[in-house]
Image (cartoon, grey):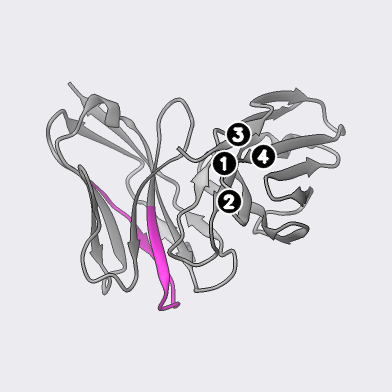
Amino acid sequence: DAGITQSPRHKVTETGTPVTLRCHQTENHRYMYWYRQDPGHGLRLIHYSYGVKDTDKGEVSDGYSVSRSKTEDFLLTLESATSSQTSVYFCAISESGVSQDTQYFGPGTRLTVL
Amino acid sequence: AQKITQTQPGMFVQEKEAVTLDCTYDTSDPSYGLFWYKQPSSGEMIFLIYQGSYDQQNATEGRYSLNFQKARKSANLVISASQLGDSAMYFCAMREGQGGANNLFFGTGTRLTVIP
């Protein structure tokens, strides 16, 4: 199993509060990703990173920011959480960015915004 | 247009029988990768099998095989000798291009139930 952990695993918060989710890997992979999973949508990419301090937006990036100060850690921040951000969040890692490279997923974080 | 289409919201299969989960994809990029993931009720996403667009042979991994029909743009997952532990959601996904951290596009999934 790929060494990926996410914290917290569950979180309940209120609308308007900031929230940070953490993804930690022990594989020394260059690429890291944040996805959200919602019923009827599969998984959708929020942001990704292709190196320390190198990040870019995915298809559903509005309302989210990310940071990567170390190879092993990728943080996802909701500056002011909204109910539409209630979701399950998955972190993933991959060695390279080519289409043949498999992404391996962390266990997920269930976030509820009341 | 949807990049990945899974038209079967739910499927049932008898234990020890084979089952095919359908997946069609849409891309104009000649280089792409197709992936299947399993999501059991515990929630984690488990990688099952990969097929590259230039691969000449269908991918196989144990009881999993991928029926890749490039001209039809389909990448169906075949599970042989189904087991009760195969009951889960199954997602087809595609990644395009040769460089950069390309997005992995997911279908909406198929829920497979294995009947004893």
Q: Which chain letter matches label 3?
A: A
* Amino acid type, residue under disc 3 in the picture: Thr
Is residue A49 toward the left or the right of residue B17 in the image? right
Which mark identifies residue B87? none
Question: In the rendered structure, which segment of residues is drawn in magenta?
Answer: B20-35
Q: Position of residue B18 (x, y in %)?
A: 14, 40
**Distance of mark 2 from mark 3, alpha carbons?**
19 Å
Q: Which chain letter matches label 1?
A: A
For the residues tagged 2 and 1, is the chain the same?
Answer: yes
Is residue B98 toward the left or the right of residue A25 in the image? left
- Look at the image and tell me whether residue B57 can be seen: yes
Task: Tell me which numbered mark, 4 or 2, is placed earlier along the sequence.
Answer: 4
Tag 3 secondary structure: strand
**Distance of mark 3 from mark 4, alpha carbons?**
6 Å
Task: Tell me which numbered mark, 2 or 1, is placed earlier along the sequence.
Answer: 1
Which mark identifies residue A44? 2
Is residue A9 toward the left or the right of residue A63 in the image? left
Task: Tell me which numbered mark, 1 or 4, is placed earlier along the sequence.
Answer: 4
For the residues tagged 1 and 4, is the chain the same?
Answer: yes
Residue position marked by numbered label 3 in the rendering: A5
Q: Around disc 2, counting alpha carbons within 10 Å, would you say few (fewer than 14), some (14 to 19), or many (20 or more)? A: many
Residue position marked by numbered label 4 in the rendering: A23
Tag 2 secondary structure: strand
Residue position marked by numbered label 1 in the rendering: A37
* Amino acid type, residue under disc 4 in the picture: Cys
**Distance of mark 1 from mark 4, alpha carbons?**
16 Å
- The residue shown at (45%, 77%) is B29
